[in-house]
Amino acid sequence: MSANAVAAKKAVIPVAGLGTRLFPASQAVKKELMPVVGPDGIARAMIHVHVSELVAAGIEEICIVAQPGDEETIRAYFAGPGPDLLRRLEKTPALAEEARQMRELNARLHFVFQREQEGYGHAVFQSRAFAGGEPVLLCLGDHLFRGAPVSPYRELAEMVGRSGGRSVSAVNRIGPAQLKGYGTIAGARRKDFPRLIDVARIVEKPDPELARRELRVDGLGADEFLGWFGMHLLAPSIYDVLAQMIRDDVRDGGEFQLTRAQELQRAREGYLALEMTAAERFDFGTPADYLESLAWFARQAR
């Protein structure tokens, strides 16, 4: 799609988790502020990379769903260094420019708070007022994404122009061993744009037998499936679905799950998925994943 296409202008990044999988390091540094080194050799906080990529993709406002008290820490990071360090950074123009850009990014940030750990869907629901009836681009806080020649952030945001008001989730191919970690879909590809799929069912973390039997998409191998990539373009009605779930106390595993809300939304008004074929996901959620993704993220060219 062209750069002038209709696109989402708001994004949401939930970072209100407790950082249990990265404990005890997460006691010293919030997970979203842990360092990631890019191909340019500059070390940035993980959320800094997210925000930079979103703004580069045309997103104008970004809502961070945080724990109470975390706004000050994140704001302080994006405010950049004080005068003494700034003077030292002038000797390294790339870092001085980075400091200037951080202050610009800070102006785009909004914060809402998840005061109880009630699940991913509950975290997303806290951004309802921020969304203000507009579609939002939702990104996992402990994943980063990159693609060429088009940013996956931009590509999914621009699906507003093709979605007919429906939600669109980015998906990628996964095997049976990965099913336990992802929402997985069944559906049919559109003939005029085969990467776009009309979703017929969404199941959170299905077992392989169920997936082989019921979660099929044309064009895949016998043991290939399409699972969540970690980015979702959410139509405004997702907040109505989540509100009803919370009101009626509809939980899975004791929590309000976004995948359940997405399946309910699909049943009511339809749902789309976009297969990501030229983009990569970098998972920083566990120590092993963090170590592996840190190395790959630094090497990968844009």
Image: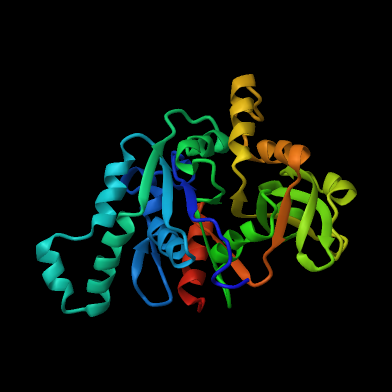
Q: Residue at x 42, y 29 (%)?
A: 115
Q: Residue at x 60, y 61 (%)?
A: 156
Q: Colour mode?
A: rainbow
Please name whichever residue, 258 or 241, is drawn nearer the observer in this view of the structure.
Answer: 241
249 up-or-down from 192: above or below: above
> Where residue 94 sits: x, y (%)?
27, 77
Q: Residue at x 59, y 28 (%)?
A: 243
> Where residue 176 sits: x, y (%)?
78, 55
80 up-or-down from 269: above or below: below
Q: Residue at x 51, y 71 (%)?
A: 296
148 up-or-down from 226: above or below: below
| Quadrant of the rendered image containing residue 24 | top left
* Left or right for 178, reference 242: right
242 up-or-down from 135: above or below: above
Q: How many marks?
A: 0
| Quadrant of the rendered image containing residue 202 | top right
> Where residue 90 sits: x, y (%)?
16, 76
Q: Can residue 152 be seen?
A: yes
Q: Quadrant of the N terminus?
A: bottom right
Q: Can residue 254 be seen?
A: no
Please name whichever residue, 165 or 287, is drawn nearer the observer in this view of the structure.
Answer: 165
**Residue at the extreme top:** 248
Please name whichever residue, 191 or 250, is drawn nearer the observer in this view of the structure.
Answer: 191
* Left or right for 249, reference 221: left
> Where residue 212 sits: x, y (%)?
87, 51
